[in-house]
Image (spheres, grey):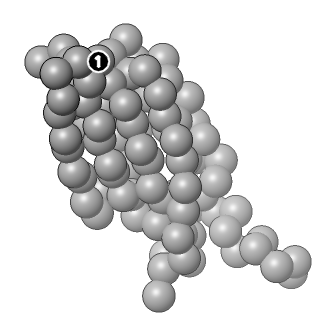
Amino acid sequence: MADGAHLAVDGPAAPMRLFLVETSSEPDALLRVLSVFAVQQVALAQVAFTSGPDYGAIRIEAHRLSEARAEQVSARLRATPAVRCVSLGWRAMA
């Protein structure tokens, strides 16, 4: 097994995924973003929301997502009308 190969599947060994999402200031932007995770049945560990006069910033940590599945969720987020930008990161689970 190559280094990092265990990260290729969803499950307990998969890392925590971090999604940084910038949205417009629409009142329903947070709900639109969270609905993507609900429809994809993604287990969330933490959600933080900050709003400014013309933007929203959402930081979401999700459990046990493979890279491919995280990319799929990111693509769906980018297709959401209120979303301006999506960044994706990860950290290994202890």
Between 4 and 21, the one nearer to me in the picture: 21
Residue sitting at 64 percent across and 53 percent down? 67
Q: Which quadrant of the view contains residue 23?
A: top left
Between 41 and 75, the one nearer to me in the picture: 75
Q: Which quadrant of the view contains residue 89?
A: bottom right
Q: Residues within 10 Å of mark 1 (few under 14, many from 20)?
A: many
Q: Residue 22: percent from the left, percent from the top?
A: 37, 31
Q: Tell me if I can see residue 45 in this picture.
A: yes
Residue type at numbered disc 1: Ser
Residue placed furthest toward the bottom: 94
Q: Is residue 77 left or right of residue 50?
A: right
Residue placed furthest toward the front: 53
Please, is residue 49 above or below residue 91 in the view?
above
Residue sitting at 47 percent across and 66 percent down? 16
Q: Residue 17: percent from the left, percent from the top?
A: 48, 59
Q: Which residue is mark 1?
A: 24
